[in-house]
């Protein structure tokens, strides 16, 4: 593990922090003096002393380590204070200092885009004296911003990954902050420190975890992204009610986070056997674009929450798009019909594409509104996404 570099006193780092604060303020993301002061004070270089830079290779995405050994100190600082996500871990255990050159892998921890971090902190609307529970410490940068704003004794942060948690603890201590840090599953919340005034998640969830509802005080706020296995996502702000209830509206913007690890999609493996199962075929009313556009993809996911996205191609043939629920064997495969439209082949117990098309049709019939038209209602019996009014179209989330 690379030791965190010390915050550069004054000089370049301080200037870059001010520049970043100006940039985020001009973009309308940083809206209050208190959060601006936090951005101007917290040394991001301590939390992300090394990271991966994304690039492309012949086999797809590659990640090149950027460390004090590969980059000059000033260049590293300039990178750290760009409004960009810094990926700090791949595949749940590979860190930049562990590898000698570009590698493949999937991001499993990062320092989130500062513009998104501050936008969410503003959306959380904490008041002086509030106690906050953060899920997904990551590098600890957002934890430190909250400590600066509200005081370390008002902040608890939970990180699932032991290596990330240890690095974050080292960095937070080096930067002089004193939150309560927990290594564990944030889906269980923190019964010891509860009740909290507000909860913010910087990993996404498929459904709102039960413990969050009784660990946040009635009237308190839960701010989280709701995501799933089709990569649909939406940032939602809930007000907690009595008796394990909460409700709220989705907020603007295309916000996504890595999914909470215990809720990650089961591996798809080789799907060829599954796709040879008997199938019904019909012309598709909507094609694969549904799984690429922001709101339709979110709708597809709430309509078919067990489905996963996959594309395949048999040598020389067209690309096929699949939605597959490997838990019950349902699948839908979209294939071009040769006339700029698609045929859909569906098999297994559920007609996934029928459900997805019905959801997209309902949204179009409502005038194709933005995600802010959707609400989430949570009670002990169900979690429901509504479009418009409670008597409009709605979808129940998996429990
Ligand atoms: C995008 S990063 C967090 C960024 C962080 N807030 C920052 O500013 O550096 C998401 C983090 O959530 C963590 N995570 C995933 N599932 C979790 C869970 N169930 N409980 C707590 N943390 C989790 C990941 O290990 C990862 O470090």
Image (cartoon, grey):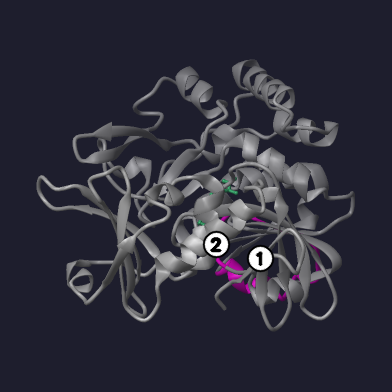
| Magenta segment boundaries in residue numbering | 185-206
Q: Position of residue 159 (x, y in %)?
A: 56, 60
Please rate how many residues cluster around mark 1, counting C-alpha atoms within 10 Å: few if below 14, some from 14 to 19, many from 20. some
Question: Is 124 left, or right, of 108 in this rendering?
Answer: right
Looking at the rendered structure, the number of numbered marks drawn on it comes to 2
Q: Quadrant of the C terminus?
A: bottom right
**As drawn, 62 above or below 17:** below
| Residue 378 spot, x, y in % from top left | 72, 72
Front-lying residue, 148 or 176 = 148
381 to the left or right of 78: right
Identify the residue at horizontal 22%, vertical 46% (top origin).
338
Which residue lies under the disc numbered 1? 393
Residue for badge 2:
359
198 in the magenta segment: yes
Q: Is residue 220 magenta?
A: no
Mark 2 is surrounded, within 10 Å at the Cα level, by few (under 14), some (14 to 19) or many (20 or more) other residues, namely: many
């Amino acid at each position: 593990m690379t030791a965190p570099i010390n915050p550069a006193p004054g000089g370049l780092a301080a200037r870059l922090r001010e520049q970043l604060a100006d940039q985020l303020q001009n973009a309308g993301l940083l809206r209050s003096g208190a959060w601006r002061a936090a951005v101007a004070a917290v040394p991001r270089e301590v939390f992300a002393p090394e990271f991966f830079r994304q690039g492309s290779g012949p086999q797809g995405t590659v990640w090149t380590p950027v460390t004090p050994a590969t980059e000059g100190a000033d260049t590293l600082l300039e990178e750290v204070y760009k409004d960009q996500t810094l990926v700090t871990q791949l595949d749940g255990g590979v860190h930049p200092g562990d590898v000698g050159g570009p590698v493949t892998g999937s991001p499993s921890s990062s320092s989130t885009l500062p513009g998104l971090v501050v936008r969410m902190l503003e959306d959380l609307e904490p008041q002086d004296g509030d106690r906050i529970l953060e899920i997904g410490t990551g590098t600890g940068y957002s934890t430190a911003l909250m400590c600066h704003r509200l005081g370390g004794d008002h902040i608890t942060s939970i990180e699932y990954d032991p290596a990330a948690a240890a690095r974050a603890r080292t960095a937070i201590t080096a930067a002089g902050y004193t939150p309560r840090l927990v290594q564990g599953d944030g889906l269980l919340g923190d019964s010891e420190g509860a009740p909290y005034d507000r909860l913010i998640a910087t990993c996404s969830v498929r459904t709102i975890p039960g413990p969050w509802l009784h660990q946040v005080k009635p009237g308190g706020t839960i701010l989280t992204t709701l995501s799933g296995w089709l990569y649909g996502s939406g940032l939602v702000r809930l007000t907690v009610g009595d008796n394990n209830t909460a409700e709220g509206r989705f907020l603007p913007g295309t916000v996504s986070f890595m999914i909470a690890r215990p809720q990650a999609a089961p591996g798809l493996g080789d799907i060829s056997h599954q796709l040879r199962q008997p199938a019904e075929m019909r012309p598709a009313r909507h094609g694969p674009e549904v799984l690429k556009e922001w709101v339709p993809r979110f709708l597809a996911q709430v309509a078919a929450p067990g489905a996963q996205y996959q594309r395949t191609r048999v040598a020389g043939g067209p690309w096929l798009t699949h939605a597959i629920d490997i838990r019950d064997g349902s699948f839908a495969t979209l294939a071009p019909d040769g006339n700029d439209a698609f045929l859909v082949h569906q098999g297994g117990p559920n007609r996934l594409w029928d459900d997805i098309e019905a959801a997209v049709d309902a949204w179009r019939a409502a005038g194709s509104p933005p995600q802010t038209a959707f609400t989430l209602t949570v009670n002990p019996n169900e979690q429901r996404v509504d479009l418009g009014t409670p008597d409009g179209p709605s979808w129940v989330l998996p429990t």
